[in-house]
Amino acid sequence: MAERKFLHELQDGDELAPLEFVVTPELNQQYLFAQEDYDQRYIAPNEAGAVFVHPSLILNMSNETRSPSYRIDPRICPIHTRDETTFLNPALVGKRFKVTWKVLGHYEKGGRPYHILDIQVVDEDGAVILTRKMHEILNLRRDK
């Protein structure tokens, strides 16, 4: 098997390994407790019998560090600088979700290298739940 690339070595069009996960009622409840959000839409079934996943759970699972192939060079310090996030459909408890990450581009600003990741979360039925464009600096650490 070829060695995985470090995050800063990824080129435009490269992808991180996808992540698949199922949101169980217990996992959703952990997020509700952490957020102190006990809205009934996240706890009790609606008239269609569905329980919604808390949006913070989906957002958390879309972080690039969740990819099985995420690998960071110890000399590099990624700093999240900007995010454009859109929720397109509700996520439902009990569904399987797939997260994908793709490098959209690189640029330099203020003498620092940045990259942009295109992130999508899709459910088992093909509904796009979330899209994100995440910008981050791939900063070289300056140890003392």
Image (cartoon, rainbow, N blue to C red):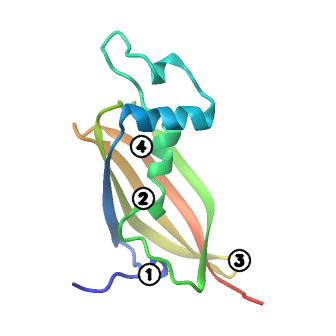
Q: How far apart are the two marked residues, 3 and 2, measured between alpha carbons?
A: 23 Å
Q: CA distance from mark 4 to mark 1?
A: 25 Å
- What whole-number distance in Å separates the C-alpha atoms at marks 1 and 3? 23 Å
Return the x and y of residue 59 as percentages of the image width and height. 49, 46
Most extreme residue toward the right, as rendered? 144
- Residue 85 point in image, percent of width and height: 51, 46
Is 52 located above or below residue 60 in the figure?
above
Q: Amino acid at mark 1?
A: Phe
Circle 2 residue: 118
**C-alpha distance separating marks 2 and 4:** 11 Å
Q: Residues within 10 Å of mark 2 (few under 14, many from 20)?
A: some
| Disc number placed over residue 18 in the picture, else none | none
- Helix, strand or loop at label 2? It is strand
Nearest-to-viewer mark from 4 and 1: 1
- Of the numbered discs 1 and 3, the one sitting upstream in the chain is 1
SS assignment at label 1: loop
In the rendered structure, the answer to whether residue 97 lies left or right of residue 88 reads left
